[in-house]
Image (cartoon, grey):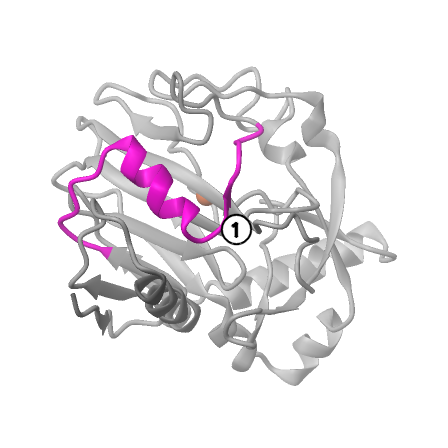
Amino acid sequence: MTIKIEPTGKSCGAFIEGVDLRLPLSDVDIEVIRKAWGEHHVIIFRNQKLNDDDLERVSAYFGKLSIDPFVKSLPGREHIISVQREADETSAIFAEIWHADWTFKSDPPFATCLYSVEIPPIGGNTLFSNQVLALEEMPITLRERITDKLALHSAKMGYSKQGSYGDKYESKGMEIIPSDKAMEVEAHPFIIKHPVSGKESIYGSAIAYIIGVSGMPQKEAMSLIMELQRWQVQERFVYSHQWEENMLVMWDNRSVLHKATGGYEGYRRELHRTTISEKDDRPFSL
Ligand SMILES: [Fe+2]
């Protein structure tokens, strides 16, 4: 089969056509996809009727599957969580804040895969912000302030017992497991270099999960990371992805931020998610 890459024409993202993900992929196919992924940051496969075995197999072509530290996985599927919201839910939309997944870990997953099972007729787009572009266009004065600096990442604002997904958060669709482990803090550089594309990008985002800057007084640090975030998520860097059912979207947490959106009250929504880490457990690339 011949794989075709069709860019979205927006700030990032490309549709991958000419591949049936129910079938095993050849090494050549995997390399073509990996290269397109490095170039476009978000890849989208339409009209793929996948089950959870397929989702795990396709994800595992690119690395090692991770286990979500704070969301209960599907029964018998430790590597898959269901991102779902029932039609009559009134709780806050899950993940409606800019972030890259699990940057609070020392070995965060470099990628996330999300497969659409049930999609409402309106709303629920996922937004992606291209952090290679955001860095390329960044004023030198701002860039100098984050160069060679370490951002401090933590899940405490989200998944500690007092966090936004803590003891008070109620969801009919998802079981969150808040814990004291969320209080841990991990440092990562603000600027990282992508191992496939060789391009530099801004890694992570304020609040979820950057909460400080190593060696910087907290007030100054918060001012910097909030200013940085305003730069990172400007509309010209953002691609708004509209879902269809049976769609697999894979994004690179090293080069895009993402954010859920609502607007589908009264409708049920369900997507299955895996995350991918480096196969050899090497430390997060700097
Ligand atoms: Fe996420």
Quarter in which the C terminus is drawn: bottom right
Residue 260 in view here: no
In this figure, what is the number of numbered marks?
1
Name the secondary structure under disc 1.
Answer: loop
What amino acid is labelled 1 in the image? Ala
Q: Residue at x 26, y 42 (%)?
A: 124
Return the residue nearer the eye: 28 or 120.
Answer: 28
Q: Is mark 1 within 8 Å of ligand 1?
A: yes
Residue range of the region highlighted in magenta in the rendering:
45-69
Return the residue nearer the eye: 83 or 171.
Answer: 83
**Image position of 156 (left or right of 59):** right
**Image position of 208 (left or right of 105):** left
Residue 178 placed where, x, y %? 59, 21
Q: Quadrant of residue 56?
A: top left
Residue 62 magenta-drawn? yes
Residue 179 placed where, x, y %? 65, 21
The residue under label 1 is 100
Q: Residue at x 41, y 33 (%)?
A: 94
Up-down relation of residue 271 to residue 60 (above or below): above
Q: Quadrant of residue 284?
A: bottom right
Q: Residue at x 55, y 77 (%)?
A: 199
Up-down relation of residue 70 to residue 2 (above or below): above
